Image (tube, grey):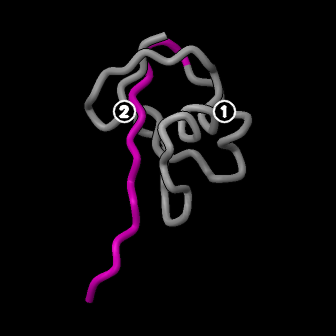
Amino acid sequence: MRITVNGKETEFSKTYLLDLLSDMGVPLNGLAVAVGSKIIPRDQWEAHLLKENDEVMLIGATRGG
């Protein structure tokens, strides 16, 4: 299925958000994830089903001051 992650289209065979993040090797600490325009709470990543043409945005926390 086609999923867009941070503006880049990718093919992905699994259907759960956490699987996508794991396959991409994304560090999960300090990460927020939105699918479409909705933030997905961390405790729902494992059960959140992705659909064809979903747009996923990964937002990493940064340190600064």
| Residue 17 placement: quadrant | top right
Q: Is residue 55 left or right of residue 18?
A: left
Residue at coordinates 57% horizontally, 14% vertically from top-left? Answer: 13
Is residue 57 rendered to the left or right of residue 41? left
- Image: 60 above or below 36: below
Which numbered disc covers residue 48? 1
Name above or below for residue 26 compared with residue 52: below
Residue at horizontal 69%, vertical 44%? 44
Q: Secondary structure at mark 1?
A: loop
* Magenta stretch: includes residue 32: no
Q: Mark 2 or mark 1: name the one nearer the start of the chain.
A: 2
| Residue on which the image places disc 2 | 5
Q: Residue at x 28, y 83 (%)?
A: 64
Q: Is residue 33 above or below residue 64?
A: above
Q: Quadrant of residue 55?
A: top left
Report whether 46 appears left or right of 62.
right
| Residues rendered magenta in the picture | 51-65
